[in-house]
Amino acid sequence: MSKILKHIIPWLIAAISLLNISSCNTSHDKEVNPVDLDFSLIKERGKIIALTGYNAYSYFIYRGRPMGFEYDLVKRFADHLGVELEIKVVRNIDSMFEMLNSGKGDIIAFNLTVTKDRSKYVTFTHHHHTTRQVLVQRRPENWRQIKQHQIERKLIRNPLDLEGKTIHVRNGSAYLQRLQNLSEEIGGEINIVEADPDVSIEDLIKMVADGEIDYTISDDNIARLNQAHYTNIDIATHISFPQRIAWAVRQNAVELLDSINTWIDSMRKTSDYYVIYNKYYRNKDAYARRVRSDYFSNTTGKISEYDDIIKSYAEQVKWDWRIIASMIYQESQFKNTAKSWAGAKGLMQLMPETASIFGVEDLSDPRESLRAGVAYIGYLDKYWSAMVTDSLERIKFILASYNIGPGHILDARNLAEKYGADPNLWFGNVEKFLLNKSKERYFNDEIVKLGYARGTETVKYVREVLRRYEHYKKFIS
């Protein structure tokens, strides 16, 4: 090798190394340019968009009902603002930050650890609670037959003993940074493996319990819940100091941040907040029941025990079966013995007189109740098809008619036309005049045939059935 090459090669290696370091830092410290979308524009839009993940404590569907700590809280915040709530499920944590700053969401309502690195890209709200990161490891196979001190000898209790170990962590999580810092602190290499973006903390904990991997990291409140389901895991080794858990908004959303912080401070003074927290993070038995249930939709894709017959009857009217499932939850919460004060019975809460028109007498039979309910939907579809030609819009008229009867909806439609609203659009148009049917000026109008109607329940019915349907679409194919 020539003397010139001997001098050039080390210089090239150094230059390439410097370039690699520079490019890594550029990727890590990318410029943040959040869209200009603050509180007033969100209020004007009438909807707040929350970005969250799905798991057995933040956001999920259980027995047909959307639930979760983050969901319950952000739903209350949206109600406090008087706006609709739209939930967007995001599997990857890094994608949440990107979507927030690009305007595809207004708030990250998720179990986020507050870190200095993340604060470069978002502004955190006041924290909801604090937690610590713990090592999740597997107890020895015969742990039930041996003494506690023998179990302890087989477990890692000192972070120094993590040197040389392989630990799998969630992609984009705060656990990665903590392990990197810990590796520096102990002066030894920890083999850190970032899981695929779609792999959740719960998935990793299950992999530890099943023996697929040896170690992962979790927040202690999440680990405690999972220990109720996987009794062979140990979570007693802390690897961090207490850390704050909070939501996040864009750095330029100052008004929204103030509004959220004021609401959080107020909410945390109420018993309602602690009821919600305990419901999802402290009730380990309820957590275990959920994740083992056939109707925990996150893992099973099921809404109820009646899914198959709902699907078969939905085919008859060419409806998405999940809309009918949402109707059934609204009507009876999937209880085939349900009976209303007015005498409506069964899963689809039909009056016996209505059911008899379609040849059904036993509404306590789930199949018969569905047969009558879907037949009635088919009848309403034909009733409205000539007037409301848009099939998606017509669904709203059918839902409203199912709740209050087509006569009152026809009255509201005629009022909408008379007063310059669109008689073929439900939201903001016909629904508005159904509400007006409780006012003397409108229910005494000569074009109104059925007189007074208290439309608030029906307006709520349509919105809640469709809102729940949107939740179902996120979890169930």
Image (cartoon, helix red, strand yellow):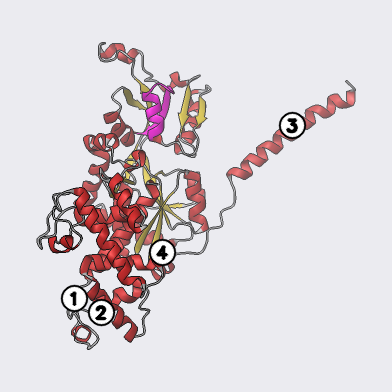
Mark 4 and mark 1: span between their CA atoms? 40 Å
Q: Earlier in the sequence, mark 2 or mark 4?
A: 4
The local secondary structure at tag 3 comes to helix
Q: Position of residue 276 (x, y in %)?
A: 24, 47
- Residue 350 sits in quarter: bottom left
Q: Earlier in the sequence, mark 3 or mark 4?
A: 3
- Given this view, does label 3 or label 2 mark the residue nearer the observer? 2
User: Which residue is rendered at x = 36% and y = 17% of the image?
Assistant: 155
Q: Identify residue for label 4.
A: 255
Towards the viewer: 287 or 130: 287
Q: Identify residue for label 1.
A: 453
**First to last magenta residue range:** 202-219
Q: Residues within 10 Å of mark 2 (few under 14, many from 20)?
A: many
Mark 3 and mark 4: span between their CA atoms? 48 Å
Please tell me whether residue 129 is drawn above or below residue 40 in the rendered image. Answer: above
Hey, what amino acid is under mark 4? Answer: Glu
Mark 2 and mark 4: span between their CA atoms? 42 Å
Q: Earlier in the sequence, mark 3 or mark 1?
A: 3
Residue furthest bottom as drawn: 446
User: Which residue is rendered at x = 17% and y = 81% of the image?
Assistant: 451
The local secondary structure at tag 1 comes to loop
Whether residue 233 is visible here, answered yes or no, is yes
The local secondary structure at tag 4 comes to helix
Q: Are marks 3 and 1 in contact (CB under 8 Å)?
A: no
| Quarter of the rendering occupied by the N terminus | top right
User: Which residue is rendered at x = 20% and y = 48% of the image?
Assistant: 366
Q: Earlier in the sequence, mark 4 or mark 1?
A: 4
Whether residue 270 is visible here, answered yes or no, is no
Q: Identify residue for label 2.
A: 411
Hey, what amino acid is under mark 1? Answer: Ala
The local secondary structure at tag 2 comes to helix
